Image: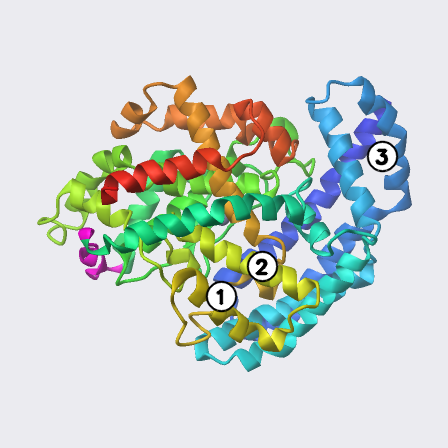
Amino acid sequence: MEDKLQLLKARMARISDLQRAAQLLRWDQETHMPPGGVQARAEQLGTLRGLAHELFTAEEMGQLLEDLAPYAEQLDYDSDEASLIRVMRREYAKAVRVPVTWVEENARATSLAHHSWAQAKATNQFRLFQPDLERVVDLQRQWTEFFAPVDNPYDPLLDKYEPGMNAEQVRAIFSGLKPELMALVEAIRERADTVDDSFLRRPLEAEKQLAFGRMVAARLGYDFSRGRLDTSAHPFTTGFGRDDVRITTLVDEHNFLRSLKSAIHEAGHALHGQNISPRLRRTGLDWGGGMAVGESQSRFYENVIGRSRPFWRHFFPQLQAFYAPHLDDISEEAFYRAVNKVQPSLIRVKADEVTYGLHIMLRFELEDELINGRLRVAELPEAWNARMETYLGLVPPTDTEGVLQDVHWSSGMFGYFPDYLLGSIFAVQLWDAMQKDLPDVTVQIAAGQFEGVLAWLREKVMQHGRKFTLPELAERATGQPLNWGPFATYLRDKFGEIYGF
Ligand code: ZN
């Protein structure tokens, strides 16, 4: 059995190398590739991903995993070996349902769709993107048919990013939380002018924004000898093993906080990647868990830490000095309140902690309808605008600020959006548990000491990579099942204090 385990590890290492090479091509596409490279790049990505898929779904792999199944049963469930066998058996069972022709076709289609999405967004012309998006949605619906029978075709899409979660569970969480969020938005709307954030729009040079982002990321523990920060239209994190985890951020000269928040968010992802156990190297388990687990780490750093009072107690004087004299007339308290201003807005990535969830619920509902055939791609802009009006009281004046704003659908990432909110919910559940284990954690943060936070997250979450599902990890890290209660309490307490209700 030891020999077979070694054979499995050797095969996973080759597959992992192919996937990392594809990720590197994708990183280059988003950061440095000239527009002319798009066609050839689509073909190269198709070939690499197709090869990885072929290797993983080979009959010998299935036999190997089947032979190892009884062996895994004898091992400790939480051990690296048992986890490798368990996770790869689950993924193999899923992957063999998908023909390699679909994988290659999807890689080509999404690469082209990504390109036309960028053009459509730049010129506010949804029709440029529509045919490619129709193709992508068709391919997603085809993909869900490989998993028939299912209660809801959206289930396998969710399960792809967050194993063990289905549409019913997500709907239950979201419908519990939705009235809480809408009540908060309403309470805050009446007191909207008590928080002034106009000074956040004072222009600041791109280079300074990036330099401050790099400094904060490094202070949080992001290791630049094993990473780098570049710019891209939509910030993301990618990695080629735990020792090369790269992030990007954007620059908005008229909103320096956007760049910083993105840098902190992606640094959170990257900290996760860099702190996975070295024992999991090249196993295919050496990446963040399900996507919600990944988002819990990025959103923990972005929101729970990065929009907290102790964080700005430490960093605000540095920010003031860095940008002098632009913020000389602003107090720490005024800055903290501005960073947390709640205001219904059009763009998800600019949203505050309260309205963010409503942006996600809108996308979840539209995706569910598209995949279930209750909504056509051509109707999407209108459906989007109608729901924006219901949830946030706003109608986007352009599709660029509406349905075209996010990159995800062009990449075929349906079923991913809910993970952002599940990640926020889990992040606060982790914060509750962390405060019990580290009673002085806010004092540490206010003193600019982030090692304790990182060590706790490394032990409870990060080191495990993809070993556990979100429900498994919630139990192990917090002793509780995933639940939205702590998140609702956190929002009520935090924003009640800021807005005075
Ligand atoms: Zn993220």
Residue placed most toward the observer, 2 or 342: 342
Q: Magenta segment, which residues? A: 194-205
Residue 313 in view, yes or no? yes
Q: Tell me if label 2 and label 1 are in contact, CB under 8 Å.
A: yes
State how far apart marks 2 and 3 are (Cα).
37 Å
Coordinates of residue 391 in the picture (x, y in percent): 44, 60
- Tell me the SS state at disc 1: helix
Q: Amino acid at mark 1?
A: Arg
Which dot marks residue 427? none
Look at label 3 and name its amino acid.
Answer: Leu
User: How many dots with numbers?
Assistant: 3
Q: Is residue 351 left or right of residue 153?
A: left
Q: Which mark is residue 65?
A: 3
Residue 387 numbered tag: 1
Q: Is residue 203 magenta?
A: yes
Distance from Cα at disc 3 to Cα at disc 1: 46 Å
Amino acid type for the residue under numbered disc 2 = Glu
User: Which quadrant of the figure contains the C terminus?
Assistant: top left
The residue at 30%/26% (across/down) is: 442
> Cβ of disc 2 within 8 Å of ligand 1?
no
Front residue of 461 and 424: 424
Q: Quadrant of the N terminus?
A: top right
Is residue 254 toward the left or the right of residue 300 in the image? left
The percent position of residue 444, horizontal first and vertical second, equals: 30, 24
Q: Residues within 10 Å of mark 3 (few under 14, many from 20)?
A: many
| Spatial CA span between label 2 and label 1 | 10 Å
